[in-house]
């Protein structure tokens, strides 16, 4: 354990906090605080026992790709983490409709779709949307789009079938938010994300991968680089040392008492960071308070009756539309078929259902987990752009997936950026640190 260097507290052990803590550990005395009962945040692996075999199953972070996750790929290589190819296929089941995008046969898994003009119209709109969004992205015109998704679709005359049975289910699943909220999602952000991730292409899409044995394998290897790590130790309050008191830094209050640190990295959701700060300034309060969050429930089970009725329509991601509008608008329902996403030793389907509209057989339920996901509306995007203005103010730093698109790469990139900024400040000498006080 280091006995010299600045003392840095990292609050939150998701990928942002772990990435920042590891990067800082070579120069600083790092203490990692985790309020919950496991390290890793959304990297949450459940040890599942079925048919006499025990194996890890991921219930949060599941996949990454070889194109848009450069920091994560580099990290896994440095840690020696084994990965395997994964599948990124998608299906929709609704009243009287089932289809999957895995192949032509699965698109028409429900043969009646061959005779439905509305279904053919949806496919035509899908191709038209991909062409239009690609042209906007490649021409740089997506940046100027100020419309939310709903207004854009209406202005471009896309049909209800395309909106309700393809685009909204897809983006609702990607961001784990209800379709009603996704109608207000910024179109520019959607186009940029889909273009970067190859989602606007029918072929030559990025290869998706997963961590062999579950994401806790990489979490444990990261933790080995952090000497002082405290599980089930919630931070209750972050207090800045008052100016003119003869020292600088922050005080962290926990149930064990108060500790002083030179810097604190709040690697947690923005609303949690705001609640921790004893006296946030007006700019911090406005920025951190602008991001809304949506509660999601994830259920690990083996009840295959929740998947599409036709096995040909099964996919890695299986979206289910609720029968009533209120339920549909309240939460996204998605069934992850983990066998398609991760190498598993069992033949029977292993499923993680997000907000199931039909409850799985309770005798087949193995875990029930609560998540919070950020809502990326216009206010949230505007807040992200103001974040650099408050970073490091009073020795307090912010990171997390909420600062970008909301994914694992975003969390890691934000944590590494904070670590780099701190290292640059230390290299600049005491004068730079004094200016931050």
Image (tube, rainbow, N blue to C red):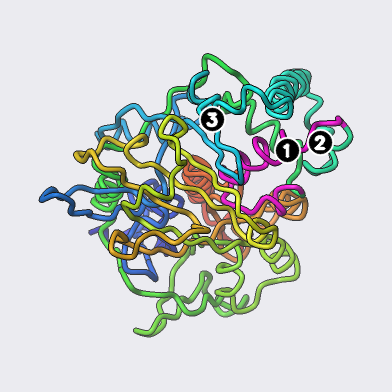
Closer to the camera in the image, 420 or 101: 101
User: Label 1 belongs to which residue?
Assistant: 163
Categorize mark 1 by other alpha carbons within 10 Å: few (<14), some (14-19), many (20+). Answer: many
Q: Residue at x 41, y 37 (%)?
A: 63
Residue 320 coordinates in the image, percent (x, y): 55, 47
Q: Is residue 163 magenta?
A: yes
Tag of residue 110:
3
State which region is magenta.
156-183
Q: How many marks?
A: 3
The answer to whether 249 is drawn above or below residue 279 in the figure is: above
In what quadrant of the picture does the C terminus appear?
Answer: bottom right
Whether residue 428 is visible to the viewer of this picture, yes or no, is no
Categorize mark 3 by other alpha carbons within 10 Å: few (<14), some (14-19), many (20+). Answer: some
**Mark 3 to mark 1 CA distance (whole Å):** 19 Å
Tell me if label 2 and label 1 are in contact, CB under 8 Å.
Answer: yes
User: Label 2 belongs to which residue?
Assistant: 153
**Mark 2 to mark 3 CA distance (whole Å):** 26 Å
**Mark 2 to mark 1 CA distance (whole Å):** 8 Å
């Amino acid at each position: 354990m280091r006995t010299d260097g600045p003392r840095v507290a990292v609050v939150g052990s998701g990928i942002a906090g772990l990435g920042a803590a590891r990067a800082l550990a070579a120069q600083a005395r790092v203490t990692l605080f985790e309020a919950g009962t496991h390290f890793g945040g959304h990297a949450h692996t459940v040890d599942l026992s079925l048919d006499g075999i025990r194996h890890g199953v991921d219930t949060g972070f599941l996949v990454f790709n070889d194109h848009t996750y450069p920091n994560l790929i580099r990290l896994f290589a440095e840690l020696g983490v084994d990965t395997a190819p994964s599948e990124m296929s998608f299906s929709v089941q609704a009243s009287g409709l089932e289809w999957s995008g895995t192949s032509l046969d699965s698109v028409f898994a429900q043969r009646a779709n061959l005779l439905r003009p509305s279904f053919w119209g949806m496919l035509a709109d899908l191709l038209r949307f991909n062409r239009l969004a690609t042209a906007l992205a490649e021409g740089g015109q997506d940046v100027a789009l100020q419309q939310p998704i709903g207004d854009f679709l209406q202005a471009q005359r896309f049909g209800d079938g395309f909106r309700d049975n393809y685009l909204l289910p897809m983006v609702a699943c990607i961001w784990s938010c209800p379709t009603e909220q996704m109608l207000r999602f910024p179109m520019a952000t959607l186009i940029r994300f889909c273009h970067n991730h190859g989602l606007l292409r029918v072929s030559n899409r990025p290869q998706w991968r997963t961590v062999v044995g579950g994401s806790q394998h990489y979490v444990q290897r990261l933790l080995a680089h952090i000497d002082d790590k405290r599980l089930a130790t919630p931070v209750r309050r972050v207090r800045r040392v008052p100016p003119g008191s003869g020292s600088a830094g922050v005080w962290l209050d926990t149930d064990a008492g108060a500790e002083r640190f030179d810097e604190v990295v709040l690697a947690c959701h923005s609303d949690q960071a705001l609640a921790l700060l004893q006296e946030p300034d007006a700019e911090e309060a406005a920025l951190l308070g602008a991001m809304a969050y949506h509660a999601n429930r994830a259920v690990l089970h083996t009840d295959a009756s929740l998947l599409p009725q036709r096995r040909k329509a099964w996919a890695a991601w299986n979206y289910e539309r609720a029968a009533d509008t209120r339920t549909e608008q309240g939460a996204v329902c998605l069934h992850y078929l983990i066998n398609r996403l991760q190498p598993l030793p069992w033949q029977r389907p292993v499923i993680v259902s997000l907000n199931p509209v039909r409850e799985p057989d309770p005798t087949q339920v193995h875990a029930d987990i609560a998540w919070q996901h950020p809502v990326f509306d216009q206010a949230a995007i505007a807040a992200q752009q103001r974040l650099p203005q408050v970073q490091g103010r009073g020795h307090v730093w912010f990171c997390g997936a909420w600062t970008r698109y909301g994914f694992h790469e975003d969390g890691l990139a934000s944590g590494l950026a904070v670590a780099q900024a701190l290292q640059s400040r230390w290299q600049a000498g005491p004068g730079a640190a004094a200016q931050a006080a």
